[in-house]
Amino acid sequence: MEVAGEPVRVQKLSQSGLGRVPSQYIQTPQNRPTPSSPSSSNTIPLIDLHKFDPTRRDSVREAIDRACRDWGAFHVTGHGVPAELLRRVKRVGLTFFNDSTIDDKLRYACDPSSSASEGYGSRMLERDDTVLDWRDYFDHHTLPLSRRNPKRWPHFPADYREVMAEYSDRMGILASDLLGLVSESLGLPTRCIEDAVGEFFQNITISYYPPCPQPELTLGLQSHSDMGAITLLVQDEVGGLEVWKDGEWVAVKPVAEVEDAIVVLLADQTEIITNGKYRSAQHRALTNSSRARLSLATFQDPAKTRKISPASELICESSPPRYREVLYGEYVSSWYTKGPEGKRNIDALLL
């Protein structure tokens, strides 16, 4: 969503040479970044999917089960998405933000009257009193194919639309394969979670975090858990993602030695379907004063008309439902109007 009037873009603010962050970007003291120990080795698990080799499936399932119970987040490699495609999609995203003029970018500006509208923007939430994130983004509506209109995407560089369409297709396949493993790791049929979600509604958001003069006061993206089923995140070498674990923020550093690593974040509807056996990942993004950062998040969500509730296979007398049924469209509306503030939207569904 964009507010009416002259659009404010964080990249333009950053390039203006300002020495202090405007007040609307300053987080409250309790939400500001906290210095982490550079020697800390605690981070999300790294799981090799072995290109879904059936002879390795049991060990992969066990690793996913541990990661989903302990973190709700993990890196995957050996997923079958070509490393060259990951390089290309980061390249076209960076080219759009770094080599296009502000006027060219504003040709694709989001609709100011609609939340989660497709296009180039900086502000997503509907509340006027919310602290703003230090980032710009481009949101693409990519699946189902009836929503995909590449003419709404940047024309520069020349292969932008082709690369994004290919990336969307590969991410949709990977998300389906991963949800199958997540289902199996709970002893459920392979398609249990995906069938509960229904047809994937996929959005791909490229986030650009410009250098910030006061990173200790700001966040690139405030603390939240994603509202849909599963999120696949590709980040550049700069880093800045953190996940909440055991009462502290833990850095999710890029895996330098593995070029094709993708971050998997369980989202709120999967927490509901698994009846809380697996928790969605609460996460945020930091800023820094010297280097711009780029990430690409692929969100796999239910249709807004879909009702989501705990899987019947996980409900019994000793394990009653922990969440009430929710219409996904109402959940999305609450997220955008109230703001995420950690995991308060899903916690409101607890019975």
Image (cartoon, rainbow, N blue to C red):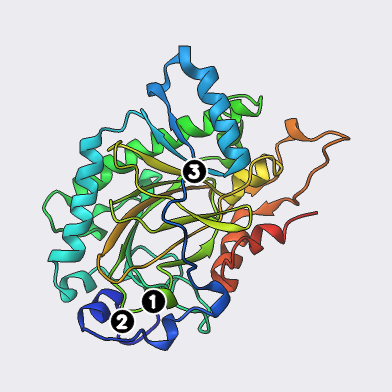
For disc 2, the neighbor class at 10 Å (few under 14, some 14 to 19, many from 20) is some
Residue depth check, mark 3 versus mark 2: number of the one nearer the observer = 3
User: In the displayed structure, does residue 206 sit left or right of residue 69?
Assistant: left
The residue lying furthest to the top in this view is: 55
For disc 3, the neighbor class at 10 Å (few under 14, some 14 to 19, many from 20) is many
Of 136 and 246, nearer the camera is 246
Q: Amino acid at mark 3?
A: Ile
Q: Which residue is disc 3 drawn over?
A: 44
Residue contact between numbered discs 1 and 2, judged by CB atoms under 8 Å? yes
Please state, as top left, top right, bottom left or bottom right, where the N terminus lies in the image: bottom left
The residue lying furthest to the right in this view is: 317
Q: Which residue is disc 1 drawn over?
A: 2
Q: Which element type, helix, strand or loop, lies under badge 2?
A: loop
State the image quarter where residue 340 is shown: bottom right
Q: Which residue is disc 2 drawn over?
A: 7
| First along the sequence among labels 3 and 2 | 2
